[in-house]
Image (spheres, rainbow, N blue to C red):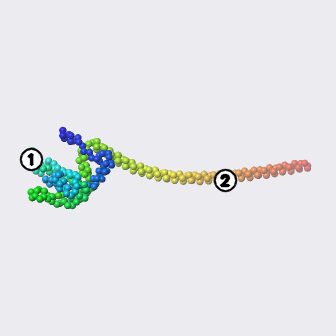
Amino acid sequence: MVEEKEDEKTIVDERFQLNDKLWQEVKREESKRGIIYLSYVPIGLNVSRIREIFCKYGEIDKIHLNKINEEDMNIISNEKSDEKKKKKKRNNKYQDGYIEFMNKKDAIKVESLLNNHPIGGKKRKNILREHFWHIKYIKNMTWNDLISSVLLRNISRKDKLQYSLKNMYKSYEQFLDKNMNNDNKKNMKRKYSSESKGNKKLNFLTIKKSKEGNEEKNNMNLETVKNIIHEESNEKNQIKDKRKTVSSSLLRSFM
């Protein structure tokens, strides 16, 4: 029953929620912090003991140590599990771990001072005296990035779907924005080109119409001149005919 309850409980990270502003603020704060990696944790060291040692060099926020599995413990010790249960509880053995400092400078300082140096101890019987620190400062890494693999295993299916949908919509919106901008630019170019072509066509048509109008006017002027000349010639012919008729009548009278 306890295991089922533990499985039902899900760890939800802030980045899997639909609140970008809150996540951005958390990310800014995390970027100011520094993380060091302990590749080897000797027997006898636990979270509280490590905090005591490293608090001298700067303010510590989080510590995470990875335990050694029972199978690995059996391989190392060559003892059966039944025999172990009968014996008293021993100290937990840790494989490696991570320490988060509130300031990056403190983490870098710890790496430069303690890496490949003995852990130390005044008493001769102290086991830690013979061991050395193996420390590495991790650049451009936040605490959530380290635990993201664990969170992805533990989060529910709904949260995974929400997170994937959120990323999908973001990428889709970015794609639409890019395409819309490109389409707007193309449409603007087409408008300018069509307007320039339209203006050229209009200018050509106006010139053509003006030429046709001038030709029509010239044709009209020629026709009017021709009509006037024709009318004048007709009038002259009529006068001549009248004169001829008068002369013929006079001749008849004299006859």
Secondary element at image label 1: loop
Instruction: Residue at 29% x, 47% y: name it.
Output: 15
- Whichever of callouts 1 and 2 sits on the residue coming sooner in the sequence is 1
Nearer the observer, 244 or 52: 52
Q: How far is the residue under mark 1 from the one under mark 2? A: 127 Å
Instruction: Residue at 23% x, 47% y: name it.
Output: 150
Instruction: Residue at 60% x, 51% y: name it.
Output: 209
Q: Quadrant of the image for the N terminus? A: top left
Identify whether 121 is placed above or below 161. below
Please give the label number shown on residue 218: 2
Residue 112 can be seen, yes or no = yes
Kind of residue at badge 2: Asn
Q: Which residue is mark 1?
A: 88
Residue 80 can be seen, yes or no = no
State left or right for residue 158 relative to residue 134: right
State left or right for residue 181 relative to residue 97: right
Where in the figure is residue 79, as x and y percent of width and height? 9, 48
